[in-house]
Amino acid sequence: MILFSICSLLSFVIMLAHGGKLPDPEVKIEVVHKPLMCHRKTKYGDMVLVHYEGYLHSNGTMFHSSRLEGDKNPVWFTLGTREVLLGWDKGLQKMCIGERRKLIVPPSLAYGKEGKGKIPPSSTLLFDIEVIDIRNGPRSHDTFQEMDLNDDWKLSKQEVKVYLEKEFAKHGYSPNDTHNEAMVEDIFKNEDEDKDGFISAREFTYQHDEL
């Protein structure tokens, strides 16, 4: 998937001339339905099961529906690891099971200037998404050992960042994306149980499932 587009050279020059910074593209979120009880919310690293419909925002043409096409089953993906559009990773955080949202996703967080299949280049997309289930993401001792670069049986923020960069690079995404920094901070906030600045093997395996 093409998850972001490059600004034109002219825009870049104008930005530098004014000493400014281009604002990050945003996903517009509308909560259509939220259940009365919410025992768990989606977070980075969770496996999330969703049903969805996708439309061209310009004219409302549907380009895909998980309920009407293929095997008509909901779709599993891991939130925050760019298995899906970056617009989904941004727009589906902190959702409850049974919650339904509409996302308006700009081209830079969807299929960019190239487009894909039924989706024309530079298209803003509208998604209607319902969360069916949330499960912990997979992890193992092998993964921990791969991340533990100095074999001290604990993970530093730098080691986690290096791991995320390698994972993103495998799929053709920039290893320098500042999104990685936010993910690292979120991971340590949830997983560093004793707040010593490291994630131990026990915390990694048994506490949470952010990675």
Image: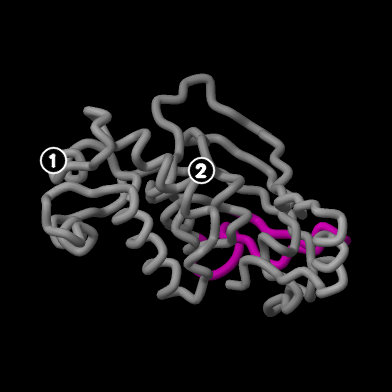
Q: Is residue 125 left or right of residue 92?
A: right
Of badges 1 and 2, the one in the foreground is 1
> What is the crowding at mark 2: few (fewer than 14 residues within 10 Å), some, or many (at least 20)?
many
The stretch drawn in magenta includes residue 54: yes
Q: Where residue 29 sits: x, y (%)?
A: 69, 40
Residue at the location (84% across, 68% down)? 13
The stretch drawn in magenta includes residue 98: no
C-alpha separation, residue under disc 1 versus residue under disc 2: 30 Å
Can the viewer see residue 133 in this picture? Answer: no
Q: Magenta region: which residues?
A: 52-72
Q: Give the label on residue 191, or none.
A: none
Q: Is residue 10 left or right of residue 33?
A: right
Can the viewer see residue 28 in this picture? Answer: yes
Q: Where residue 207 sits: x, y (%)?
A: 22, 36
Q: Secondary structure at mark 1?
A: helix
Residue 37 in the image: above or below residue 16: above
Residue tagged 1: 202
Residue 172 in the image: above or below residue 187: below
Q: Quadrant of the N terminus?
A: bottom right
Q: Is residue 139 left or right of residue 18?
A: left
